[in-house]
């Protein structure tokens, strides 16, 4: 590892295994985040699908927190401690990794739900020595479209239901929510269709349920923490 960094992060390939939209959506989402949303060469998080770190530093920092269940935020937790200790993580965009995991729609939604719950629990339980929080490889300002979308998707859904019931303000609420999401996701959507064809169209459709589960999953994680669960 050169350039004075302690860790290297590769990126997801734009390709995806299989022919289904959920697998393509997840893979291309990460590829787009690495190549379009993240602007700089250094990141505040890491993804363990392909991540290299100096062994001595990894051991010194205690490695991954083995109390964290499954593949969720163990990498974010470690990245926060690494950066807090003065380390840096550089993106090696020239290294693309073809991820072999496949998803059905149900598996994708369960994965996203568990991930969001884990992120909330991670943020709430953090104590001294954990550094600044890291819940994404992108910085908060780079994830604004996703955060806005997680809010806008609800008036869009409610507007759809109100329209179906004949309420006059329904179409306006639906249009406002949809346009706000589209404004933030146009680049991802156009790239998905260009790369994935019909799978890209499926990826556009999957954006909406994926955004919709962020808020309830976050609330679920917060309630679990209040009930005494830390992990």
Image (cartoon, rainbow, N blue to C red):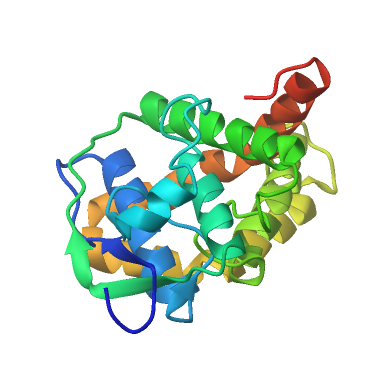
In this view, the residue farthest toward the top is: 227
* Residue 209 position by quadrant: top right
Q: Who's the residue at 71% across and 18% down the image?
A: 229
Q: Is residue 156 above or below residue 7?
A: above
State the count of labels.
0
Quarter placement of the N terminus: bottom left
Q: Is residue 218 left or right of residue 87?
A: right
Question: Of 136 and 37, which appears nearest the observer?
Answer: 136
Q: Position of residue 210 (x, y in %)?
A: 53, 41
Q: Is residue 109 above or below residue 3?
A: above
Q: Is residue 150 left or right of residue 54?
A: right
Quarter placement of the C terminus: top right
* Residue 218 position by quadrant: top right
Q: Who's the residue at 21% across and 47% down the image?
A: 99
Question: Of 113 and 68, which appears nearest the observer?
Answer: 68
Q: Is residue 212 left or right of residue 19?
A: right
Q: Who's the residue at 79% across and 36% down the image?
A: 166
- The answer to whether any part of residue 136 appears in the image is no
Q: Is residue 72 above or below residue 17?
A: above
Q: Position of residue 188 (x, y in %)?
A: 43, 66
Q: Position of residue 116 (x, y in %)?
A: 59, 37
* Residue 224 position by quadrant: top right
Q: Position of residue 118 (x, y in %)?
A: 59, 33
Q: Who's the residue at 73% across and 50% down the image?
A: 151
- The answer to whether any part of residue 195 appears in the image is yes
Q: Is residue 31 left or right of residue 116?
A: left
Q: Is residue 174 above or below residue 8?
A: above
């Amino acid at each position: 590892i050169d350039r004075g960094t302690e860790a290297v992060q590769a990126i997801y390939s734009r390709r995806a295994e299989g022919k289904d939209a959920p697998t393509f959506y997840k893979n291309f989402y990460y590829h787009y985040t690495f190549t379009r949303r993240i602007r700089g060469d250094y990141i505040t998080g890491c993804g363990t699908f392909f991540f290299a770190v100096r062994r001595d530093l990894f051991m010194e920092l205690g490695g991954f927190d083995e109390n964290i269940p499954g593949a969720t935020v163990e990498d974010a937790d470690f990245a926060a401690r690494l950066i807090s200790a003065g380390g840096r993580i550089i993106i090696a965009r020239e290294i693309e990794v073809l991820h072999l995991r496949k998803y059905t729609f149900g598996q994708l939604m369960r994965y996203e739900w568990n991930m969001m719950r884990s992120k909330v629990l991670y943020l709430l339980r953090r104590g001294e020595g954990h550094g600044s929080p890291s819940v994404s490889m992108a910085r908060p300002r780079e994830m604004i479209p996703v955060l806005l979308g997680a809010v806008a998707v609800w008036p869009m859904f409610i507007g759809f239901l109100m329209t179906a019931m004949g309420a006059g303000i329904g179409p306006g609420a639906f249009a406002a929510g949809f346009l706000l999401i589209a404004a933030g996701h146009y680049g991802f959507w156009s790239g998905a269709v260009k790369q994935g064809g019909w799978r890209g169209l499926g990826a556009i459709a999957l954006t909406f349920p994926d955004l919709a589960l962020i808020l309830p999953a976050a609330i679920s994680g917060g309630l679990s923490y209040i009930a005494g669960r830390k992990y």
